[in-house]
Image: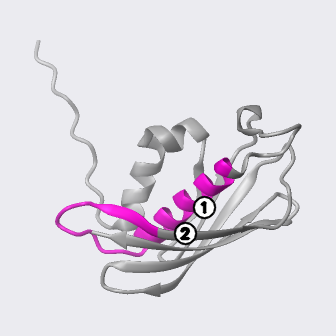
């Protein structure tokens, strides 16, 4: 009996790429980040509450929040992008302002495209809790392809 390895699905565009990539990425999976909404120029991700992500007391670590910012920027940049011949991408810059502590809560990464160039994409990111408190605000540049 011969068993064939299943061929992974081939994404047609950047949004489908993110639908496949996010759950398969070891780091994203480790954090538990999931897509809530993937649109061409806007995304919403969730970082579920996990006590492993605390820094002091019950506060979510700034590094976990920064990781959510970075993952949100990546997902947003790719979601409206055509697929290049070779899949490559990298965050080239990221600036974050931490505005309020997040305590024992899920967090949402909300990203929207500010400008899409040939390969560089500028993304506006907000990190909010379920009560819509703005925890962090960021801007990032991501290179697609």
Q: Residue at image x 60%, y 40%?
A: 31
Using the image as rendered, state which of residue 79 and residue 62 is in the foreground.
62
The residue shown at (78%, 40%) is 55
Q: Nearer the viewer, residue 53 or 30?
A: 53
| Image spot of residue 75 (x, y percent) | 48, 63
Q: CA distance from mark 1 to mark 2?
A: 8 Å
How many numbered discs? 2
- Which is nearer the N-term, disc 1 or disc 2? 1
Residue 54 sits in which quadrant?
Answer: top right
Q: Residue drawn at (30%, 58%), measured in percent from left and top?
A: 11
In magenta segment, residue 76: yes
Q: Residues within 10 Å of mark 2 (few under 14, many from 20)?
A: some
Residue at (54% x, 60% y) in the render: 70
Tag nearer the camera, 1 or 2: 2
Task: Label 1: state its secondary structure.
Answer: helix
From the image, tell me which residue sits under label 2: 94
Which residue is label 1 attached to?
69
Describe the element under mark 2 as helix, strand or loop.
Answer: strand
Q: Residue furthest left?
A: 2
Residue 80 in picture, x, y percent from top left = 42, 75
Q: Give the percent coordinates (x, y) of residue 6.
A: 23, 34
* Residue 75 or residue 90, whichever sits in front: 90
Q: Is residue 86 left or right of residue 145?
A: left
- Magenta region: which residues? 63-92
Q: Is residue 21 above or below residue 58?
A: below
> Is residue 79 visible to the viewer in this orientation of the structure?
no
Residue 100: image quadrant is: bottom right
Which label sits on residue 112?
none
Task: State yes or no: residue 145 in magenta.
Answer: no
Neighbours of disc 1 within 10 Å: few (<14), some (14-19), many (20+): many
- Disc 1, disc 2: CB below 8 Å? yes
Extreme residue in the top direction: 1
């Amino acid at each position: 009996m011969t068993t064939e390895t299943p061929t992974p699905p081939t994404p047609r565009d950047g949004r489908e790429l993110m639908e496949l990539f996010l759950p398969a990425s070891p780091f994203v999976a480790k954090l538990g980040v999931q897509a809530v909404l993937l649109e061409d120029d806007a995304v919403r991700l969730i970082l579920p509450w996990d006590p492993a992500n605390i820094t002091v007391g019950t506060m979510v670590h700034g590094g976990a929040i920064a990781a959510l910012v970075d993952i949100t920027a990546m997902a947003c940049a790719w979601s409206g992008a055509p697929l290049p011949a070779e899949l490559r991408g990298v965050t080239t810059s990221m600036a974050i302002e931490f505005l309020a502590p997040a305590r024992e809560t899920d967090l949402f990464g909300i990203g929207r495209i500010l400008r899409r160039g040939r390969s560089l994409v500028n993304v506006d990111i907000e990190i909010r809790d379920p009560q819509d408190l703005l925890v962090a605000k960021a801007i990032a540049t991501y290179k697609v392809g």
